[in-house]
Amino acid sequence: ALAPPWPQLVARLPTVAVEPPLVVDAVRHVSTPPPLPDDEVILYRERNGWCPYSERVWLALELKRVPFSTVLIDNTGGSR
């Protein structure tokens, strides 16, 4: 049996069918707070994707189709 073509697989993905979440890079909003919605879950996750805990939450939100916004944070101790 042949695998379905790539465009057919992409069309089946739930994240393709919905609007992608807002992603804000906190490093670029040092002096002012980022524009975030008041009525959504906000996921704060590490900028480079190295945190397995926030990755699990991210995947759960996607799987459950919970609307959320993402704020990417720098946890490498940049200014420490």
Image (cartoon, rainbow, N blue to C red):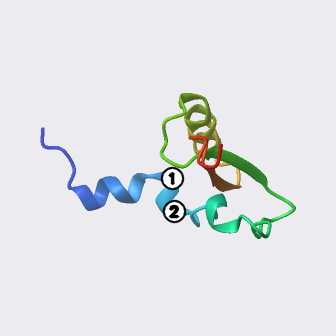
> Which mark is on residue 40?
none
Q: Is residue 24 visible?
A: no
Tell me which residue sits at (54%, 33%) in the image.
Answer: 51
Left or right of 45 on screen, residue 35: right
Q: Residue furthest toward the front?
A: 80
Tell me which residue sits at (44%, 52%) in the image.
Answer: 13
* Numbered disc 1: secondary structure: helix
* Numbered disc 2: secondary structure: helix
Q: Which residue is mark 1?
A: 14
Q: Residues within 10 Å of mark 2 (few under 14, many from 20)?
A: few
Tell me which residue sits at (51%, 62%) in the image.
Answer: 17
Number of on-image labels:
2
Q: Is 53 located above or below residue 19 in the figure? A: above
**Residue type indicated by callout 2:** Ala
Q: Is 28 located above or below residue 75 in the figure? A: below
Tell me which residue sits at (53%, 29%) in the image.
Answer: 52
Q: Position of residue 49 (x, y in %)?
A: 49, 42
Q: Nearer the viewer, residue 15 or 41?
A: 41
Q: Nearer the viewer, residue 13 or 31?
A: 31
Q: Residue furthest toward the left?
A: 1
Q: Examine the image and state in which quarter residue 53 appears.
A: top right
**Residue type indicated by callout 1:** Pro
Q: The C terminus lies in which quarter of the figure?
A: top right
Work out how far the residue at label 2 is from the one at label 1, CA to CA, in angstroms.
Answer: 5 Å
Q: Position of residue 33 (x, y in %)?
A: 80, 66
Q: Nearer the viewer, residue 4 or 38?
A: 38
Q: Which residue is mark 2?
A: 17
Q: Position of residue 73 (x, y in %)?
A: 63, 50
Verify CB contact (< 8 Å) between mark 2 and mark 1.
yes
Q: Is residue 48 visible?
A: yes
Q: Residues within 10 Å of mark 1 (few under 14, many from 20)?
A: few
